[in-house]
Amino acid sequence: FKNLDCDIIISGSDQLWNPLLTGGNLDKVFFCDFDSNVTKERYSYASSIGQKSIRPQDEEQIRKYLRNFVEISVREYHSISELKKYYDGEITHVLDPTLLLKQRVYSDLAIEPQYSKPYLLIYQNSFNKETLKVAKKIAEEKNLQIVEIGYYKNFPPRFHKQVITAGPREFLGWYKKADYVVTNTFHGTVFSILFNKDFYSIPLKGRETRVLSLLEIIGLKNRIVYNYEQLKEITSINYSTPLKLLEREKRKSYDYLNKIINLGKLNNK
């Protein structure tokens, strides 16, 4: 990093600042903490701490690392108040970058599965027994097959079709063709929205802030459930208002990116 030919450095996004995902400690590289002779303007885009609060053992380090940034932007609203305890500069809320692209970009990339039956898609990256319960309840009411896409088998195959060999384009294809989605992940929720699918999101307790933050700003908080007993009525989604709200947030996110890029260029003249 000693001879970078650029005007600014942007760190982001996802859970770069979650020590549980970086070997148990904060990784200084994701805070642009490089050699002292690198003086490029440094910003963050949609960074996530992945938790509700900073661990006490990380407070001193994060206070030091955050000083590297001219400005910070985060993916979850709750992170703003948490990070303000350790950073005096401006902190902005922006969208996860997957939400900045139009649906047609993902649709054009998608490789649709050769599967003719109407289906409900399950996508989860950690085991949650409520996911299958919710999916089975919806599938029975909507007369849908259940297809689970993932990278390991969560349930006995006799319950439903499982796909564990899909690449990124196949992943998009299964989403594009799905009639309903049940997921317990943030990006599973994101792609449900991008493809305008009826869905329910079942976030793991203690890790729901990412999903909650997104669904709150586009008026779909009611798509969060924690167990199948909460599904008193299985409803469809009218995307008219959510898509307008999402477009508003996209403009804000693009404005932030344009601002820091132009500011970085100006400061490096």
Image (cartoon, rainbow, N blue to C red):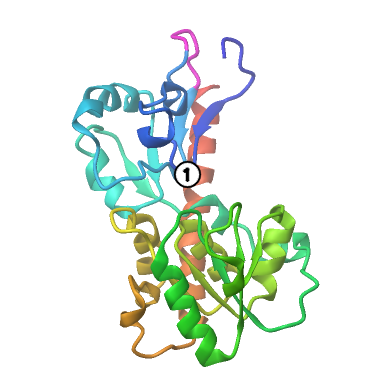
Q: In the image, residue 138 lies at what x, y percent?
A: 49, 84
The amino acid type, in three-letter code, at marker 1 is: Asp
The residue at which mark 1 appears reads as 14
Residue under the point 46% across and 80% down = 241
Judging depth in this view, the residue of 78 and 246 nearest the camera is 78
Residue 238 in view here = no
Left or right of residue 267: residue 145: right
Instruction: Specify the quadrant that holds the C terminus.
Output: top right
Please state which of residues 74 and 26 is positioned toward the viewer in this rendering.
26
Q: Which residue is depicted at the point 23% across and 46% down? A: 81
Image quarter of residue 51:
top left
Element class at badge 1: loop
**What main secondary structure does the magenta stretch of the protein show?**
loop
Range drawn in magenta: 35-40
Q: What residue sits 51% from the left and 81% below the top?
A: 239
What percent of the width, then of the height, locates residue 67? Answer: 32, 24
**111 or 63, which is in the foreground?**
111
Residue 191 drawn at (x, y percent): 57, 64
Quarter of the image for residue 214 reads bottom left
Query: Is 262 left or right of 109, judged from the image as shown?
Result: left
Nearer to the camera, 53 or 126: 126
For label 1, count other residues whose C-alpha is less than 10 Å away and answer few (under 14), some (14-19) or many (20+). Answer: some
Q: Identify the residue at horizontal 35%, vertical 60% (top origin).
A: 213
Locate the N terminus by quadrant.
top right
Residue 225 visible in the picture: yes
Residue lying furthest right in this view?
Answer: 114
